[in-house]
Amino acid sequence: MTDLSILVFVVSIAALIAVYAIRLKAVPMPSLAAARAEIIAYVPGDTKTLSDFGSGWGDLAIDIARHRPDINVTGIELSPVPYAISRMRAILAGRPNLTLIRGDFRTLDRDPGDVVVCFLDPRIMGDVGDVLGQRMRAGSIVISRAFAIPGWQAFGDVPMTSGSDHLYLYRIGRHKAA
């Protein structure tokens, strides 16, 4: 490969990331190990299925699958570059309880499971609330890092010890303010 072809490749990847960041109104952000551990600690012990909306580079989904082999974990990511990287990382991790889907959580016709985790731009949190309010069963849990779901009542607003973010914890069926 020549220097020019490497440069073209790198610029193309960067442009693809930028285009999707603008389209999705979000830049894919990796999660630090300490933040992932805090989120995993809030996943209930009886969880069987979990979805990570906007799974990005796969950090959290892979970590949950690794630490909780009893849970079937699905990461959902629309942006092609983070999705491709997360797929490669998932193959290397070799977790049979991990599935990654390239798609938009808003249009996928699937049950999100017992728990949904997300770390998404605040401008689309209303969409998260709309989708989960329609698709999740009563008693299911939503764990949102950093951004609250508009119009929802969290049963927990927990400051994270790994940084300045909060975790917003919701239970479907009790998530609407009275």
Image (spheres, rainbow, N blue to C red):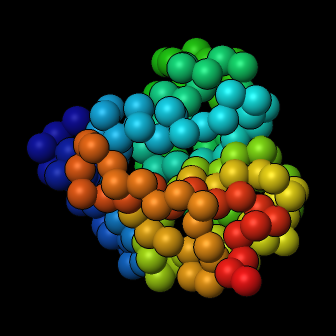
Q: Residue at x 58, y 66 (%)?
A: 154
Relative image position of residue 136 (x, y in whole percent):
82, 59
Image quarter in which the C terminus is found: bottom right
Give 140 or 23, whichever is nearer the viewer. Answer: 140
Residue 160 sits above or below residue 96 on the image? below
| Whether residue 47 is visible | yes
Q: Which residue lies furthest to the front in this view?
A: 178
The number of callouts visible is: 0
The answer to whether 76 is drawn above or below residue 74 in the figure is below
**Residue drawn at 57 percent across, 82 percent down:** 150
7 shown above or below 99: below
Rendered residue at 26%/43% (across/down): 162
Image quadrant of residue 73? top right
Image position, residue 142 (x, y; %): 64, 56
Give the quarter of the figure containing the N terminus.
top left
Q: Position of residue 36 (x, y in %)?
A: 41, 37
| Residue occupying image coordinates x 81% and y 65% | 173
In the image: residue 121, left or right of residue 94:
left
Which of these two is toward me, 120 or 85? 120
Farthest residue in the left direction?
A: 3
User: Residue 58, how many percent across, how many down?
Assistant: 48, 39
Let me know if residue 20 appears in the view.
no
Q: Is residue 95 left or right of residue 48?
A: left
The quarter of the picture where residue 176 lies is bottom right
